[in-house]
Amino acid sequence: MLSMIYSTVFMSFLGFFQMSGGILVFSLSLIVVMFFCFFMSSSPVMFCDYFFLVDNLSILMIVMSFFVILSSLVSSCKDLYLSEKVTQKNKIKSTSFGFEGAVLMVFMCCIAVFSSKNIFCFYVFFELSLLPTLWLILSWGNNPERLQAGVAMMLYTVCGSIPLLMILISSYLWFGTPEFLSMKLSSQDGLKHYSSYAGLVWVIMVMGFFIKLPVFFFHSWLPQAHVEAPLAGSMILAGVLLKLGAFGAMRFFWVLGSWNLTFIYYFFMILALYGGVLTSIFCVCQSDIKSLIAYSSIGHMGVCLVGVMSMSNVGWAGAACLLFAHGLCSPLLFSMAGSMYQWTYSQSISLNKGVLLTFPSFALFWMASCILNMSFPPSLNFLGEVLLVCSGVHVFSWFGLLLGFLCFFAAVYCLYLYVSVCHGTVSNIIQPLSFLSERYIYSGFFLICPLAFGFMSSDFFMV
């Protein structure tokens, strides 16, 4: 049903766009992907062989990655031919791989993570996805601080991933198999063989996922990496790489089952929600557009973590829905921020004003991006947050207070971003362009459509 609707919408609107850039690739690829999802959504485990395990959640994350990678390439098409580096002698030196190579490497690593059947293959590609991202930040970042951002990202990840590897090896020795499905069907009792140390082992295991999610207290690498990364790096980092942490946590919780860790569960839920409220307040105080969008991701991922840790069907459905919705909405906001950088060559909110007077079409896309990010009904964001709020309140009724603050401040900083960028007069210290590249409109259109009409296929998010 949804695939047919998308096909009709895209064929209807295709005539309104000029056939250039990535518009034709976008339309045809999106139609193919929607038909693929339509025919593959009839079984809980769609495909399983020696190497791959593909279920509804895997397909959902792969489709989301496909959207994000395509939109990042179209939004950054000015960088696609920057495979040539300028040496110290000002001579052009060709390299075999460049910007597009790094983006495609991230995509392949993410597909391997989302469809991996083996825990060690999962771990290898889970960590390998950071290397091309680091390459994007160091090679195509604009500021000297990109080295500090890359080092912070790698240090946080390594500190969480090495203990995770030890736990995976121990689990392999206990279960006698490295495969997710075999561990799920095993007669062993998950982490109970650690007896009194089971709580500590559980915390060590999930810390690698929580750092990449990231959970509050372990999030300081994220805003810095977003600010220093190029546009495609920010879109991929927010749209795909943050979802690896949530996907890993859901996959391992699925294997281990609902285990009695009540105190630890409550601690991480409260930490995620409290940190989400604080970072949402930080968003209102930000002067950098990309930093504001980065901090908003922490709040959304905190709500998602509550749904995952609730271990309920409603919570997991809401988490899958919000992961997909945020995976498209956050790159959409970064794409709009990239259009502002092309106009003013600055990421400062105080300089990027007056879009409604100068570029009304971009103001329309800014409005759509902000209202989707604040979960305006009946978008996918709204559906996911409703399910997550219900699951959180069911776990502990007082969570409703923190979840209410999160929703309120999300609306506050989205309105603040829209009013600051689109209204007001253009600053006198910049020279406004007569036009902005149409590639941002192409990217925004094909990210907005699944977010606005995705509620029609809400049954697909029941993972």
Image (cartoon, grey):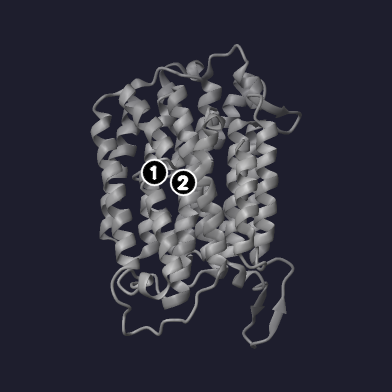
Find residue 80 and report its horizontal and vertical position in percent: 65, 69
- Type of amino acid under label 2: His
Residue that numbered label 1 is attached to: 300
Determine if residue 242 is in view: no
Residue at the far bottom in the pictured view: 89
Residue that numbered label 2 is attached to: 326
Find residue 290 and report its horizontal and vertical position in percent: 40, 62
Find residue 162 and report its horizontal and vertical position in percent: 53, 41
**Picture quarter containing residue 442?**
bottom right
- Type of amino acid under label 1: His
Q: Does residue 397 appear to the left or right of 307 in the view shown?
A: left
Q: Residue at x 46, y 40 (%)?
A: 380
Q: Quadrant of the N terminus?
A: top right
Looking at the rendered structure, the secondary structure element under dot 2 is helix
Is residue 350 placed above or below 452 in the rendered structure?
below
Is residue 279 placed above or below 164 in the rendered structure?
below
Pick whichever, 397 or 5, lies toward us: 5
